[in-house]
Amino acid sequence: MAFGKVSVIGLGYIGLPTAAVIASRGIEVVGVDVSKKAVDTINQGKVHIVEPDLDMVVQAAVTLGKLRATLKAEKAEAFMIAVPTPFKEGKQPDLSFIKSSAEAIAPVLEKGNLVILESTSPVGATEQLATWLQELRPDLSFPQHAGEDADIQVAHCPERVLPGRVLEELVSNDRIIGGMTAKCSERATELYKTFVRGDCITTNSRTAEMAKLTENSFRDVNIAFANELSIICDKLKVNVWELTSLANRHPRVNILSPGPGVGGHCIAVDPWFIVDSAPEQARIIRTAREINDGKPLYVIEQVKKAADQFKRPVIACLGLAFKADIDDLRESPALDITLQLAKSNIGKILAVEPNIKELPEKLSSQNVELVSLQDALEQANVLVVLVDHKPFKSLTSADINTKVVVDTRGLFSRF
Ligand code: SAJ
């Protein structure tokens, strides 16, 4: 049975592109968000987040009347939940946004509906969602009790798109479809097939949850290896960028790039969900998190040593975003490093971030100045490369040869 109307709960970095892509396939989509500002912006055909081409797709979907946003959930055939799952104090998963979503959709749920959890979640979260829904709607049956005969189908289909390439990857990536029963998987597959070109592979909800956490932990562990290597190489006076480019010529070696630490709201968070579920067993996964979380401190110490060489240090931090060519400052090691440097009173701190117009308050209140790359080159005696944004890649040795450079991204040591 085709889908006439789909509701997406949470219109952020994942929910909004998903809603817009489904709407672009001619399906009526209603997006629900708690932010009035986000809802109003979307209803004007505009976007409140930066992601390549998203503005065009949203504008087209809204203009054609296929996409609209509301503050209150309404009836639909399928509900896709794409809300944040951060961690709480003690690095325990915080499922409160999923719970609020359950409370928002429960009053409008009807027999035959499909509920999909897209948010990255600890193992068991989909079953927990179904339990909350059952408590709120005892008149309906759910898969945990009714199995294949349930009134409501529930599945976990983790999002796997890379910020900066979301629209492309939403369509081209394979999807893992973890239904609470085979029937749930089947129904969810029907929905994803309306817009996914990649394969839709079915499994159960717990395996789907663990698969997503595993993907991000795998990347975190591999980045931790690169970060640890970079610190070992500094000690041994070996250029880590040359080293990895040589080692990577081996047909079965593929070392990732060291950096100032791991940022974003996914890779720096999700491995903790595994650690929380299996604290005794998740040893490499925990250590990798600790190594990556410790890297900013190491960079700060390097910058302090560099600044010590000057009477009046002027330190330009190149990049604040959590990775190249995006505007997202959430959980960004570059931002943390800049803030800690400003707080340590070692000199004047300049920030260059071509993707934002205004500094976050926590930086401006510490007298950090947002300047152009050109101004930074004119004023600074210490350059700290924190993000490999495109404009920084065109710097030449003539631009930097009078400066002391702390290059966390290997921008000036490409092999
Ligand atoms: N990083 C390095 N060295 C590298 C690669 C990345 O230091 O070699 C750093 C980046 O600078 C950044 C952080 O790691 O601070 C994470 O960046 P990323 O590009 O690896 O990943 P995200 O967080 O943008 O997106 C990830 C993706 N997961 C995987 O590649 C396994 C994406 O597919 C997921 O959908 C996303 O997490 C998510 O939402 O979970």
Image: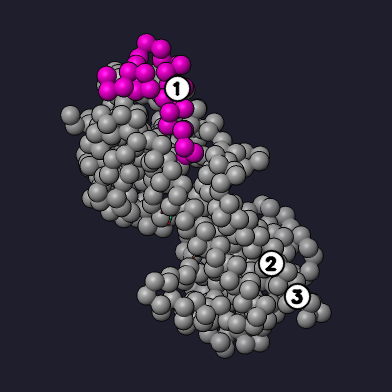
User: Does mark 2's beta carbon lie closer than 8 Å to ligand 1?
Assistant: no
Query: In which quadrant of the rendered image does the N terminus lie?
Result: top left
Contact, mark 1 vs mark 3 (Cβ under 8 Å): no
Res 201 seen here: yes
Mark 1 residue crowding within 10 angstroms, few (<14) / some (14–19) / many (20+):
some
Which amino acid type is marked by label 1? Answer: Thr
- Taking the spot 56% from the left edge, 62% from the top edge, the residue there is 224
| Residue 141 is inside the magenta segment | yes
Alpha carbon of mark 2 to alpha carbon of mark 3: how far?
A: 11 Å
Q: Which residue is mark 1?
A: 131
User: Does mark 1's beta carbon lie closer than 8 Å to ligand 1?
Assistant: no
Using the image as rendered, state which of residue 368 and residue 267 is in the foreground: 267
| Residue 351 is inside the magenta segment | no
Alpha carbon of mark 2 to alpha carbon of mark 1: how far?
A: 45 Å
Q: Quadrant of residue 312?
A: bottom right
Secondary structure, mark 2, is helix
- Taking the spot 68% from the left edge, 57% from the top edge, the residue there is 363
Q: Quadrant of residue 299?
A: bottom right
Q: Main secondary structure of the magenta part?
A: helix
Which amino acid type is marked by label 3? Answer: Lys
Q: Which residue is mark 3?
A: 305
